[in-house]
Amino acid sequence: MQRVGVFVCWCGSNIAGTVDVKAVAEALKNEPGVVFSTDYQYMCSQAGQDMIINAVKEHNLTGIVVCSCSPRMHEATFRKTAAAAGLNPYMVEIANIREQCSWVHKDMALGTEKAIILGKAAVAKVNLNAPLTPGQSPVTKRALVIGGGIAGIQTALDIADAGFEVDIVEKKPTIGGKMAQLDKTFPTLDCAACILTPKMVDVAQNDKIRIFSYSEVAEVKGFVGNFDVTIKKNARYVKEDICTGCGACVEKCPMKKNPNEFNLGMDNRPAIYIPFAQAVPKVATIDPNACNMLKNGKCGVCARICTAGAIDYTQKDEYIEEKYGAIVVATGFNPISMDKFDEFAYNQSKDVITSLEFERLTNAAGPTAGHLERPSDGRSPKTIVFVQCVGSRCDACAEKGKEYCSKICCMYTAKHAMLVRDKYPETEVYVFYIDVRTPGKNFDEFYRRAVEEYGVKYVKGMVGKVVPEGDKLKVQASDLLANKQLHIDADLVVLAAAIEPDKSARPLATMLTASMDTNDFFTEAHPKLRPVESPTAGVFLSGACQGPKDIPETVSQASAAAAKVIGLLAKDKLTGNPCIAHSDELMCNGCSSCANVCPYGAITYEDKEFRMPDRTTKVRRVASVNPAVCQGCGACTVACPSGAMDLKGFANLQIMAEVDAICK
Amino acid sequence: MQVNEYKPLIVAFCCNWCSYAGADLAGNNRLAYPADVKIIRVPCSCRVNPTFILRAFQRGADGVIICGCHPGDCHYTSGNYYTRRRMAALFSMLDFLGIEKERTRLEWVSAAEGAKFAATMNDFVQTVASLGENKRLEDLRCKK
Amino acid sequence: MQKITREQLIAKASELLSNGTVSQVLGWGKGEFDYDVTPTLFSSAEELENGFVFNDFCGANFSKYLVSKAAKADGKLLVFLKPCDTYSFNQLLTEHRFDREKVYAVGIPCEGMADISKVKAISGDGIASINADGDNLVVTTLYEDAPITIATKDVLAERCINCKSKKHVAYDELMGEEGEVLASNRFDEVARLEAMTADERFAFWQNELSRCIRCNACRDACPACTCEKCVFDNPNSGVENKSPANEFEEKLFHIIRAYHVAGRCTDCGECSRVCPQNIPLHLLNRKFIKDINEFYGEYQAGEEVDSRAPLVNYTTEDLEPGEVFDRGDNNA
């Protein structure tokens, strides 16, 4: 029999306000095994924890029940407390009487009654707890960063700086990501390329970092510290190690009319191309859908012109297997498609563009060499209307837009408006907004400058319709503050499109067994306390794959993720989760049901010799669980007909004891 | 509070990663649901053995609800897909034996769906309450 | 009347024993009564001649015995398998429950076996002897002077009336003609129950299951119930229980038992055959099979070795448990 101590937390008034904590402590005194029961204002405080430690010593406790907030909040805390008191940390059970009781029930009598029952269930469970010791596994001291935007770049540089090897997998032919496409950055207005490209060069030159560009992750196996990753290097038909990036092939390629992705299709590129001048790696790539040689074997100009002999039309996709200890997801974002937003005439007029297209239009390296020209006729626009929240904060229209705020649009729109007024002071600039959100260092000052110094006309209200008429765009909008309808003849309309996670994120999450929210943003292990970790051990989150972020935030998160990775890779051995499956081989039938359902391949079979009651021996096939691979889901325990497979920490008897305690 | 008001006993099995977190979120947002709901935390909905459900009924539960991550979102990749098949088979069998099908339910509640968790529990408690006490599957021997 | 005779089977077994192919024979042995047939191990032609029987009551499915007997046999074990037995044979192989190398399987044709309770319903109790005579059974009883003649087809077991297959899915050697997979009406009774109201179904099952005496015969005969240790015998399982304390207990036992074999049950019908209380336990298994067929596509356990049972499998598009009841065939 255990000697159980019960500790009921008030959580200030959070619990004590709706639950009679004294009554709970009193009632639980009578439960089997309970030898001590008390209550305290804040169990998680140092004083509260000391109280537990003292009680363990004083009453020779073997098990602890804390009736407090969610175990997701403080289970780890109280396990450490138990360890400090000399107990096995897994001799602790938490009764969640805050999130699942005091906060959701208003009636004191009902709340108290339920808290007592939850406490009884925890006592019943802890009575069946056994000390658990986590297994240990080695750590491969190398990290994989998926995505080579500013987030991935920063994470990789920081990890490499700490002395660990890092591989970056980038699906585009070059690293750089969205930031490489930007013109200037808010709120300082320094040019994006000027601050990004040196970092890209740092990556290229760092001997700890390898770049797999034009590549993607094909398969992930294994677990924290021991991931086995298959990287698919797509055939670019150019030998990366030989190509010097001279660009002669790009100039001579006859297939010149292919939409240039880097400029969002606003100009063309040849079939063989280098995305931009500062690309890393600066290596040409052949677009197999555009290249005549690859399509029908007629051409071969690039191979003839290349003095280095880098062109290889026979190149095949290559699969590379690598081992990693940690994986960082930095898959970033994309603006959403404007196809469903017919009211803004995006697909009807070339002069309705997205903000990212606007970045390219004003970028000195863009399709217009930085001159602000209308895509339709090249004239400089005299009236520009910026529309914010296109697809963001979409409540009623959630099926075409996003419910969340895309966070970066207010600031970049202010930047765009300001830059237009700065360079072309005669241009009239309107910005339509729902709210202007400018929390961030020097952000509000920046926005006010746009309004006060640069005379950008901010109008609170949404644009209802944009109708192309002649060479004008008729913009119908409402001014909510003046309570009137506005009709503006604009030359250019710029839509601040909502941003969404990259489409590659969802299949990647499945491979990583990392969870995502309904918007396909990766879920963090804790929204406040573990914001750069995925709940899946060994998988870390960097940048906008976790939620909309601007550059400074992305870089901070990237460095934070790197710090977490470095902390992991610095360890020689990892301590695992001891709540894993195990098979009682005396009862195991060897039927393979468990192995069929195991998502991790953690179960293998061996033929084992058993001594039978009649002194004969019998060889039977029995299951064995690899403790380093098992993640403790318990699928096998239900698939097992004989009940030989059980889960430590969530054993059949423990859960049934909880059921009994709740139902009695 | 009326003394004689019938209060159903509801056992909710919630997976640690989504639904238990969803229940916590309902708490964080103070979204009320009846105290009749008692939650048991399991690592994954696929840990819920049909035996546990029958046991709860045997010991006097009036309704049992299993909550897991949405299909495709299982922390363990596929656990909830097995849960879905197992529960489809079990619930259909209970119905075949004449046990009211409304007493069992499987719901997908993500960590972000505190509101759905509270709404689901409100609805389930109401449904079970309208059926009254679980006479058919309860073990009188164990009922005090 | 079976198409194959006792003498043919003994001759085959003796031949395989004498040429060393097998060292033992698993066959039907003489019991106390003519209808009482016991699975028995034979090691010689003499033992076969003295104890081996083959008649219309040889329903026992021997597959299950292979789990314990095959491992112990010195050489190979000869087993006679009716078509329905071969499905269990394959299912046990799928679950690695016996060593195929230790078994020599002879498939035999089957014309359906008789149900003794149906015979007794006609003849009355006190059966002294039953002998096959062409398509009839001739029954003598202690209470009737004249022998009673009953048409075999009138006393066929339910599972044989609804036979799903006369085709053997596994054997080393086949005696007689190979049959075919049949279109059976075996799910009709399940469908009839499904069409009832929940109250009617509850009443039906309460009536049936309340007769259970928890003798465990269903479990002990079931070729899917081959666990090294059954959860109901294991004090650490949390559900260990033998006494039928009340009606619920039986349900818990039978629900869990049916669930444990769901997707693995070949519908051989042994559970109902051996039930001394004549509870139609096979209906529980058939309900699972019918559901699985309807929800996840046709699946016959044991049809192929190494097929993956539906409950240890999934697709991302599976229907939700709630949708199970919205399928229109269920008015409860």
Image (cartoon, coloured by chain):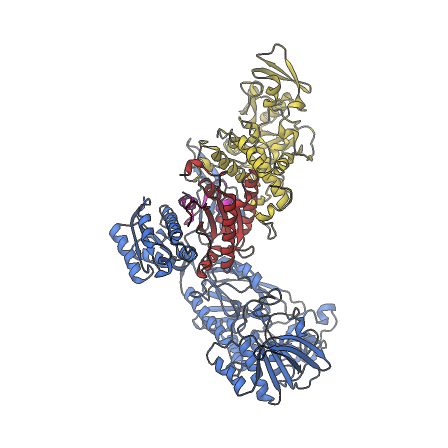
Chain colours: A blue, B red, C yellow
- Is C131 on the left or on the right of C66, as rendered? right
Residue C222 x/y as whole percent: 54, 33
Residue C1: quarter of image: top right
Q: Nearer the viewer, residue A91 or A429?
A: A429
Q: Nearer the viewer, residue A392 or C269?
A: A392
Q: Nearer the viewer, residue A393 or C48?
A: A393
Residue A504 x/y as whole percent: 58, 65
Q: Is residue C79 above or below residue B67?
A: above
Q: Quadrant of the C terminus of chain A?
A: top left
Q: Is residue C307 above or below residue C141?
A: below
Give the extent of the magenta segment. Answer: A636-663
Residue C241: quarter of image: top left
Asked whether residue C77 appears in the rendered view, the answer is no
Q: Is residue C236 magenta?
A: no
Residue A346: quarter of image: bottom right
Residue, far left: A58
Q: Is residue A649 magenta?
A: yes
- Is C141 on the left or on the right of A442, as rendered? right
Residue, far bottom: A426
Q: Residue at x 57, y 12 (%)?
A: C142
Q: Residue at x 67, y 67 (%)?
A: A314
Q: Residue at x 69, y 34 (%)?
A: C182
- Is A233 on the left or on the right of C226, as rendered? right
Residue A29 x/y as whole percent: 30, 48
Residue, far front: B2
Q: Residue at x 70, y 71 (%)?
A: A290
Asked whether residue A520 appears in the rendered view, the answer is yes
